[in-house]
Image: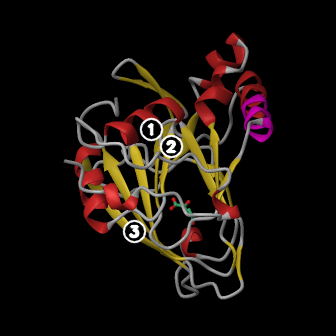
Amino acid sequence: MHVGLEARNPVPGSANHEDRLTIPCGVIDEVPFANERRQLRDTGYVLLPRFGAGALVGLLETLGRVLHVEEVVVDPTSASLVKSTEGLSLHTDHHRAQFIVWHCIAQSDEGGVTVLADGLAAYLSLSHGHRAALTGVLLQEHSVFRGDREQHPLVTMRDGSLRLYYSYWLAQGEITEAARAALNAFEAAVRSAHHVELRLEPGDVLAIDNGRMLHGRTPISGSKSRHLRRYWIEAGASPG
Ligand SMILES: O=C(O)CCC(=O)C(=O)O
């Protein structure tokens, strides 16, 4: 039986949870986390309000192997943008993370709203020419794991599926005019895409497909006591 049934109730009457894609309560899965995996596959993300700690462990196990865990907190002594109070524009994380799972431990009383957009849909909305031009674009990547090459293509094909990698910085000094025009078109498509805004509350778990969904956040203000625990997961199989 599913370990997280008690955690499936949507937060009652919470305006902050209105735009959220949540799991209906009271459904017993035949396969562990089948509903969560289906939503992840179909929409690119799944929000699990007030998910239990035991259920979180089970979810992580079912998604794949945890590659890296990071405490996303405000830390003025850190040089990392993620640990600043700044808003972050839409991006993906390390290309090896097929999924990202955030567990909200605390939320600031102002700001720190999570923003998601379907980057793959934005890419697929481009003309054939722009899509072709983007296949040659390399973006910078922080070296985190042994063997990292400090750059990664914006678009790759993995196991028959297109995957996006979208960091803030170009790896090449110069790119062709066609690639520049295609990047501009991609950025415009991302800007005009539907942006899902989620204010995570303590206990909430948010999982996204990192090769599809771009994520960002609004600036963190007020108490700044926000704390998300972030898991990067390398998947062995598709979420379906
Ligand atoms: O603070 C957030 O909501 C997200 C930070 C971020 O970009 C990340 O965890 O990769």
Q: Is residue 69 left or right of residue 32?
A: right
Residue labelled with disc 3:
70
Q: Label 1: which residue?
A: 40
Task: Let me know if residue 191 is in the magenta part.
Answer: yes
Dot label at residue 45: 2
Among the 4 quarters of the image, the one containing residue 166? top right
Q: From the viewer's perspective, is residue 81 above or below residue 93? A: below
Q: Which residues are magenta?
A: 185-192
Q: In the image, what residue occupies the spot 78% across and 27% down? A: 181
Q: CA distance from mark 3 to mark 1?
A: 21 Å
Q: Residue at x 56, y 23 (%)?
A: 135
Identity of the residue drawn at 70% across and 12% down: 129
Figure quadrant of residue 145: bottom left
Asked whether the beta carbons under mark 1 and mark 2 sit within 8 Å of each other, the answer is yes
* Amino acid type, residue under disc 2 in the picture: Tyr
168 sits left or right of 69 in the view: right
Q: Is residue 100 above or below residue 166?
A: below
Q: Secondary structure at mark 1?
A: helix
Confirm whether residue 117 shows in the render: yes
Element at label 2? strand
The residue nearer to you, when weighing 105 against 9, is 9
State the SS at label 3: strand
